[in-house]
Amino acid sequence: MSSETGSHSFDRFQSSVGRFDISGKTLLIPDMAPIGARLLAACFRAFGVDAVLMKTYEGLALGKEYTSGKECFPCQVTLGDILHHLKKEQERLGSDFSTKKYVYFMPEADGPCRFGMYNKMQRLILDRFPQFREVPIVSLSTGDAYGAGGLLPPHQASIFRKLSYVAVIIADVLDRIVWRVRPYERRAGMTDNHMEEAVQMLASMIESTGATLDFNLLHQKVEEIALQASSFIDRRKPRRPRIGIVGEIYLRSHPDSNQNIIRCLEAFGGEVVDASLGEWVNFVTFERIKKTRRRWKLAWRRKDHAQLRLILRQLLDLEIERGYQFWRQSQVYRRAMRHLDIQPDHTIGSIERRLQRDHLFTFDIGTEAALSIGGALAYVHEGFDGIVNVFPFTCMPSTICAAVLKPLLHREGIPYLDAPYDGTTQPNREVALRTFMYQAKQHLESRKAEENGRATLWRVKH
């Protein structure tokens, strides 16, 4: 019996987890980043897909009930979200409820991160509910840089990928506008209210015109948002210590899971910049190029000319894709930075160079640890006054990151804080954050005194 059950379970991974035509379905999207997830849903709706952003964190108890506690915390959160949403839909629709109309969206990644197994495990758990068994899990993968082939018709899949990338970059820029302005706003709530209206407007624009790939209107709207937000700043307020956040992409982006750490750090006197969503997408492309180059070297050693020609074409396509991403990302940031000095994003190449220069880590190992370590060093180089590493409790890549960064930044005198989360509230959390911010303020004062001393010395000499 157990053998048959196991075989059947593996069959379900093929038949009910993967890429399916989502036309005419309601696509259920987990809420990871408050702005990014909303714009992604709008991208799907631009192609006629009924994309719904599920309420998040309200089903955490369900997520924990059907897991053992050994799973990555985002797995519990997203599992709770889908179970809670389907249960509420069943209550709302009664006898009209049909699982045939729903598709659950859960991407995956390769490598050692447990994220690659979320959709498989959640498939097993959904199958324990007869009423939810027929809900397929649709998945995009890092294997082809989250291409949408199989979900949408081929001509639409290519357009969707371009649109969704620009939407992700716009979301990053909007986040950075908020983080630059909110700590200095003239009246509390101005920035959040402005951004709520802006996101709704942008989502409507993407939904109505996004499929045309005419980004001029979106760029113009981003510029208007930045211009208006810049007027909220009280210029009399001194610049706060800047805090850079690195870590696991879901936890650092999901306010409920990280217990609103950005707002807490702002409340205790900081100005915070979180690592971007676009950074991860760019990293995936960068990794594919590196892997393709390794394949080319192997084919060269074998003198396999047919493979060399094939790999060379693939490499050319990937380099064009990387150039396209750099171009589109620069366009969006440039429009916002005409009016507001938001923090630019780190390029993947610059992060890799920082890692290689000090022999701290290597992209050949992969995982988010490479981005977190390199990103933290980039923050330090840019004059940030503290680094926070946000991650799920027991996360392997982030634990590696902590092992490298903590002693390194301690030697450099840069305040550093590990912030692991598993859904519980640590009793000393506020004390730890306040102490960290006190250290960051001291670092800012020390750095300013040193800069003033150098400026005075230069004037004396000249």
Image (tube, rainbow, N blue to C red):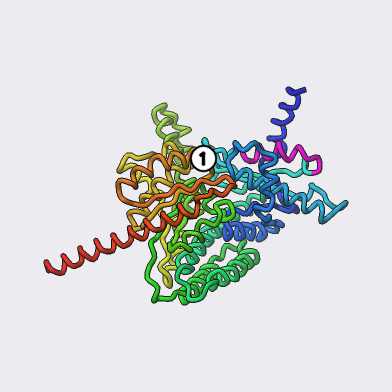
Q: Where does the image place residue 94, in percent across and percent down from the top left?
A: 86, 53
Mark 1 Cα within 10 Å, few/some/many (few <14, many 20+)?
some
Where is residue 178? Give x, y as percent. Answer: 50, 66
- Residue 288 shows in this picture: no
Which residue shows up at 70% across the image and 39% down it? Answer: 66
Q: Is residue 439 above or below residue 222?
A: above
Residue at which label 1 appears: 395
Location of residue 11 with respect to 243 vertically, above or below: above
- Residue 365 appears left or right of 136: left
Visible residue check, residue 269: yes
Image side of residue 239 versus residue 63, left or right: left
Count all numbered tags in the image, as a single digit.
Answer: 1
Q: Quadrant of the N terminus?
A: top right
Residue at 43% of width from left, 36% of height from top?
365
Whether residue 301 is in magenta: the answer is no
Tell me which secondary structure the magenta stretch mostly adopts.
helix
Q: Which residue reaches farthest right? A: 95
Residue extending furthest toward the left: 461
The segment highlighted magenta reads: 117-131
- Residue 168, given in percent of the width and then of the height, sits at 54, 57
Three-letter code, disc 1: Cys
In front here: 453 or 286? 453
Q: Residue at x 57, y 45 (%)?
A: 422
Q: Residue at x 68, y 40 (%)?
A: 122
Disc 1, SS: loop
Q: Position of residue 454 (x, y in %)?
A: 20, 63
Q: Quadrant of the C terminus?
A: bottom left
Nearest the eye: 1 or 347 = 1
